[in-house]
Image: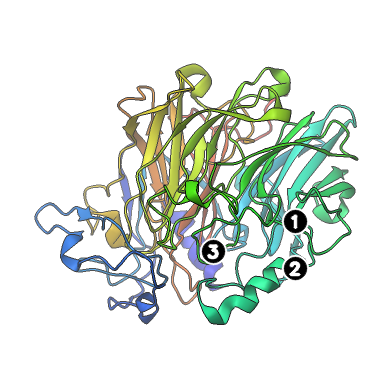
Amino acid sequence: MKLKLIALLISAGLAQQALAQTIVAPAAGTPKLPVKENPESAKGIAGEPAKPDPASYGLNPATGVYKHPAETPSIGGTHPFKGSLDHLDQSSYLHNTKVEALHPEMLGSPYHSWQTTVDMNGRRYMVIHEKSFYKVFDITDPRKAQLIAQKKWGWGSSEHPFGPLTIQFNEKLGKHVAVQCYEVTRFGILENKYKPEQQDKIDTIRKQPILRGFRVFELDGPDPAQWKKLSELPLDANSSADKFPQQGSGCGDIPVYWGGKYLFVSGAPDDSFSNQEYANFLYNQAQMAFDLSDPRAPKRLSTWWVPGSRAGEEEEYKKNPRVGKKTAWMGARMPLFIPKDPEKGGKYGYAAMGGMGFHVIDVSNPAKLTRVGKLDMPVSQAGTEGDNIDVSKVEKSGVVYYSGYPLNEDCYEPYKDIYAIDVKNPASPKVIATLPRPTPPKGATFTDYCQRRGSFGPKRSGYWHQPGTPSDQYLVYAFYNAGAQIFDVSNPAAPKIAGYFVPPTVDPKMNQHFGDQTHGVFIEWDRKLIWVFTNHGGYAISSPLLGAPVFDLPAKK
């Protein structure tokens, strides 16, 4: 009830045009926070990067700009510094954006969630989900989103009842088809594989009796409880869906599937993909292609990985400067980023392989994925170094946008740049620019977003399956405590910030987690709407940069 009341107050304060820079003062007080360092932050892992000299980073009082540490261990808890706010900033900051609606009920997890949409029977539905829950909303009128179905499981469920999914229309079946991924439990069992007392947890993960792969469903409606399972396939080629335990990680993030022949996922197909620095993960995930011509009988096509990923490839693995520091995520988190379906002539995909770099992959024959170019990226640990690649502009500009994201709070790690990479010559990709680091507007009570508490840096630029045609000019990124940032990349060599929506933080009495304040965006390009997902709900945002918003369904072509 309290959260809904504050949401109404916030919504009332924000429902205004904000073409120019606007600061919206808080509707309520500013909850106080401790400035002293959380004791949890004292717990490191032997062998990780040493804690940096306090004099090597911090807020410059003369310029008001925060200098990030060059390298840090991966440590939980808060890490405030001299100049950090001692309260949660409840103001909002808008430039070239307008809040059309705030839906507190869209909060499913304050840490992370995925979104996908499906148009059925003249309505548009959004499925918001994580591994422990799903919620289905009718967003036909985005200002009046209605919850129509939901389900929640406990954290650490051994069944892993839900996972990241893609929904597409399958012409052969004449119905929508959902492909959903399942992987080993990454939270709640194994905390630190480098600790002797955690070795039994490694065994628990290896023996989990769960599907480590994907399922294919036929849809008669938007509620997953009503979906009909057509097939399931583990990534482990030496197993079957009903055989446990299976080897490998299962498949990770949102699968790439256009509704036709080809499916792409990330994952480790067996336990030999084990060269992984990250403390609570056992696998180095590869890129995999499948044939889904018959959704009832998927077939394995090929697997590509970075040399050094597997047991027996340690000599190659040790060439990476991150090895031995037990901090970097090595291998893929997400599947290949492919601007065009290979079935319709797509030739290249792009792989973000964590601390193992950026790679250009020939996907014209998915039965034989082949690397044609690579780029080693700067070391930037802690945090995730290579996670997302935006390919929405590449077919016209020849440029993709590559990024990781922060994991430590209060900027206690190197800043995670978004790199503009020229791939016109796929054999020789090169960085041509980095997107600007967001700064607070004049009039804010702080001069650098690192002071605002929580995480600061890019998360992702939405999803490849967002409805409509992406803008040729603008990119939208979730930026944690800097909200949603809109970048103008019309000149890829000189990108600039053209707009933003930075929501208020949230009272810790209502939500104990404020580290991942804005952790997702989903853009309805066909309706000129930006959905911004925060630790207190989902916002529907419009921007004159994208054009006038549409509040009903656009006519189908």
- The total of numbered circles placed on residues is 3
Give, as a three-letter code, the residue at label 3: Pro
**Is residue 100 at least partly visible in the picture?**
yes
Placement of 365 over or under 202, stated as above or below: above
Mark 2 vs mark 1, CA separation in Å = 9 Å
Quadrant in which the N terminus is drawn: bottom right
Q: Quadrant of residue 531?
A: top right
Gap between marks 2 and 3 measured at Cα: 27 Å
Of labels 3 and 1, earlier in sequence is 3
Residue beneath label 2, please? 208
Choose between 452 and 212: the one closer to the eye: 212
* Mark pair 3, 1: CA separation: 26 Å
Instruction: Report which residue position mark 1 lands on.
Output: 212
Q: Secondary structure at mark 3?
A: loop
Residue at 41% in and 72% down: 45
Q: Which residue is mark 3?
A: 110
- The residue depicted at 38 percent of the width and 66 percent of the height is 48
Between tags 2 and 3, which lies in front? 2
Q: Is residue 220 left or right of residue 115?
A: right
Label 3–label 1 contact, CB within 8 A = no
Amino acid bearing label 1: Arg
Q: Residue at x 69, y 23 (%)?
A: 342
Q: Residues within 10 Å of mark 1 (few under 14, many from 20)?
A: many
- The amino acid at mark 2 is Gln
Q: Position of residue 363 (x, y in %)?
A: 64, 26
Q: Quick one: label 2 or label 3, which is nearer the N terminus? A: 3
Question: In the rendered view, does 517 fall on the left or right side of 190?
Answer: left
Residue 219 at what x, y percent from top left?
85, 43
